């Protein structure tokens, strides 16, 4: 691992995505262990998509290897695609290939629980989502639960979106319904490769706000790996503080913030 900085942010650079995932999973597991010792829940803020997959895989392996129970862990998901109907906004079908509910179940909860004793795994009811009928209530629920222990942040490759917060989103934004710009929808065609045309990508989503992340998290880690995130890293490094035109720069406003990159993505720093 190499250490550097982006502005005021400490940056760790790892040989590959797997080493990055292992290191972040170690940090998360230490927090989970501390929360269990204190008799409280551990809230983990989770994006869907490609960037955190190695972290979720490593967290499951480490929990199984150490025998650490995870039944007090709450997965706080960032967002979900919506359809606009005559009755209002509704979540996309949970079995859709791009459904964040599907991703949370198949690629987060089940992956983390895979080798953990059934009684020690994360229960399905402890996977939270903002609800389209009352999105602002999500912030209230997180606050009432004591806040998020660690929020994993991933940056959109082309426009820096975080969750569904597009360029121009304010730093104090809360959970809400958001119209999705073409730049975010194009990025998500890579995240969900079964999309074959931009017209297939939903045009609305419900999402945590940038302020939800910054105000309600005790720790935040922005992760990026692989060649397609080099521009995102370069753009983040050009920000001295939060820049609303690059939402991922909200990391500058987060408590105990850090950046974790693999060597390929870190080439964007050069």
Image (cartoon, rainbow, N blue to C red):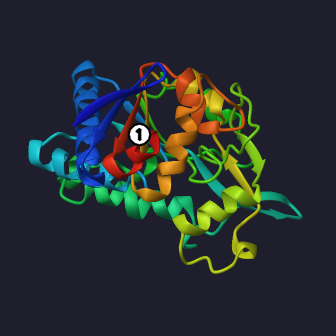
Q: For residue 226, what is the image quadrant?
A: bottom left
Q: Residue at x 58, y 50 (%)?
A: 156
Picture coordinates of residue 120, whole percent (x, y): 22, 46
Number of marks in picture: 1
- The answer to whether residue 197 is visible is yes
- Furthest-front residue in view? 270
Circle 1 packing at 10 Å, graded few (<14), some (14-19), many (20+), is: many
3 left or right, relative to 225: left
Residue 83: horizontal and vertical position, in percent? Answer: 76, 64
Q: Nearer the viewer, residue 240 or 199?
A: 240
Position of 256 with respect to 21 (left or right) is: right
Q: Quick check: can you spot residue 49? A: no
The quadrant of the picture occupied by the C terminus is top left
Pointer 1 residue: 74
Residue 190 image offset from top left, x and y in percent: 55, 67
Q: On the rendered image, what quadrant is the N terminus found in? A: top left
- Residue 13 against residue 189 in the figure, above or below: above
Q: Is residue 71 above or below residue 201?
A: above
Residue shown at 63%/81% (left/top)?
196
Relative to the observer, which residue lies in front, 143 or 215?
A: 215
Which type of secondary structure does the marked residue at label 1 adopt?
strand
- Judge left or right: residue 219 versus residue 17: right
Residue for point 60% across, 63% down? 188
Q: Residue furthest right?
A: 86
**Where in the figure is residue 34, as x and y percent of width and height?**
24, 23
Residue farthest along the bottom direction in this orientation: 196
The residue at the point 29 percent across, 47 percent down is: 21
């Amino acid at each position: 691992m190499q250490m550097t900085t982006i502005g005021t942010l400490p940056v760790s650079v790892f040989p590959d995505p797997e080493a990055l995932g292992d290191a972040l999973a170690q940090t998360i597991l230490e927090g989970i262990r501390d929360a269990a010792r204190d008799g409280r829940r551990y809230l983990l803020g989770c994006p869907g998509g490609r960037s955190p997959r190695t972290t979720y895989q490593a967290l499951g392996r480490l929990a199984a290897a150490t025998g650490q129970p995870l039944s007090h862990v709450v997965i706080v998901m960032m967002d979900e695609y919506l359809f606009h109907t005559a009755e209002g906004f509704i979540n996309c079908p949970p079995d859709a290939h791009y459904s964040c509910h599907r991703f949370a179940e198949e690629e987060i909860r089940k992956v983390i629980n895979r080798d953990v004793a059934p009684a020690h795994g994360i229960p399905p009811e402890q996977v939270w989502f903002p609800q389209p009928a009352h999105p602002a209530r999500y912030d209230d629920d997180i606050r009432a639960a004591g806040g998020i222990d660690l929020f994993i942040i991933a940056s959109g490759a082309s426009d820096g979106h975080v969750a569904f917060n597009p360029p121009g989103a304010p730093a104090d934004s809360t959970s809400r319904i958001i119209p999705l710009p073409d730049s975010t929808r194009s990025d998500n065609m890579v995240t969900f490769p079964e999309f074959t045309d931009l017209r297939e990508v939903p045009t609305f989503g419900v999402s945590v706000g940038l302020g939800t992340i910054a105000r309600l998290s005790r720790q935040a880690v922005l992760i990026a790996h692989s060649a397609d995130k080099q521009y995102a890293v370069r753009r983040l490094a050009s920000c001295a503080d939060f820049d609303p035109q690059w939402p991922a720069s909200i990391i500058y406003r987060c408590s105990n913030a850090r950046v974790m990159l693999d060597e390929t993505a870190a080439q964007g720093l050069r």
